[in-house]
Amino acid sequence: MDTKRKPELLVVTGMSGAGRSTVGNALEDQGWYVIDNLPPQMLGPMSDLFALSKAKLPKIAVITDVRGGEFFSELQSRINDLKNREISVRLLFLEASDAALVKRFESVRRPHPLQGTGTIIDGIARERAELIGLRESADLIFDTSDSNVHQLTNRVAEAFSENANFLRVNIISFGFKYGTPVDADIVADARFIPNPHWDEKLRALTGNDAAVSKFVLSQDGVEGFIANYVAALEIVLQGYRSENKRFATIAIGCTGGKHRSVAIANEIAGRLSRVADATITVAHRDLGKE
C-alpha cells in the first residue's frame, strides 16, 4: 500500500457514559468520517479500503467500546498492528468519575453494559478494570466529569479541527484537596511555596491578582523552579511533537487551587508561549471553590 495514501485514524474508546456520542458528533462536524461500534478486527481492512480511494483521504474516527464483547479485548493488539504498518493512528480515551457516570446512567434510566445483575457502580468497576491497559497507552485522555455537551464539543474542536495539526498545550491550575486532574500528562506541585492564605491582605484575592502573583513569584526558589521547569517542558514538548502527540495537559497544583497554583500556571504559560512552538491555553479548574 502506498504510504502517501494512508488515512489518519483516531480510535475513540473509554468509559461508558463518558461522552463517546458527543465526541463522535463533534468529530463529524470537524469533517471526520466517524464509524461507531466497529469491531477492532475491522480496523486494518477499513484502513486499507479507505487508502484505495481515489478521492482525498478522510480523517477517520472509530468509536469502539465494551459493547463489542469478546471482540473488544483485541483492540490494543489491533492498534499495535496498525502502528507496525506505519499507519497514523491515535487513541483517545474518555474518562469520568464514578459519581458523574452513575448520575448519567440514572438520568437516562439505562443499565451499565457490564453491570449484569449487579448495580451501576459494579458495572463501572468492571469496565475500569478491563480498560486499564488502554487508558495507560492512550495518546490523549479527556476527563468529562465536569463537562457539559457544549464544553466537550469545544474541546474536541480545539484538539481535532483542521487547523489543529500543531501542538496545543493546556496549562491547568488545581487544588490537591479536590483531586489531581486525571487527564493531566504532567503534574507539578506548588505547595513548597509559602501560602498567601495566611496573609490576611491576600486571603480573599486569587493568583490572578497582581498582589498575590508578586508575593508568590518573589519567594525563594520560585524563579529557579519556573525557569528549570519551562526548560524541561521545552524538551518534553519537542518529544511530544515528534511522536505526533498534538494535545498536552500540564497541571500545577497547590492546596486549594486559589493562590499559588494559579499564579505559577499563569507565569509558566506566559514564558512557555514565548519559547515553545505550540498554542498555549490556561484554565483554573478550582478557582471559585473556596
Image: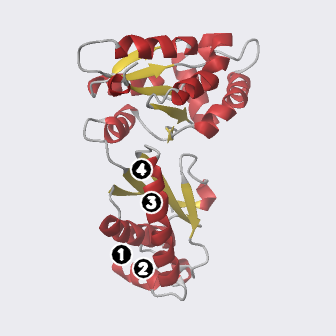
Q: Position of residue 226 (x, y in %)?
A: 48, 76
Near mark 4 (Cα within 10 A), the count class, few <14, some 14-19 or many ≥20, is: some
Give the CA separation, mark 1 to mark 3: 14 Å
Are discs 3 and 4 less than 8 Å apart at CB?
no
Is the C-beta separation of discs 1 and 3 under 8 Å?
no
Secondary structure at badge 3 equals loop
* Sequence-first tag of 4 and 1: 1
For the residues labelled 4 and 1, the Cα–Cα distance comes to 34 Å
Q: Is residue 182 left or right of residue 172?
A: right
Tell me the element at label 1: loop
Please tell me the numbered disc located at residue 212.
Answer: 2
Give the CA distance from mark 3 to mark 4.
34 Å
Of the residues shown, which amino acid type is indicated by label 1?
Answer: Asp
Of labels 4 and 1, the one closer to you: 4
Q: Which residue is mark 1?
A: 209
Looking at the image, can residue 51 be seen? Answer: yes
The reply to whether callout 2 and callout 4 are in contact (CB within 8 Å) is no
Could you tell me if residue 203 is visible in this image? Answer: no
Instruction: Find residue 130 and report its horizontal and vertical position in percent.
Output: 70, 26
Quickly name the residue at label 3: 288
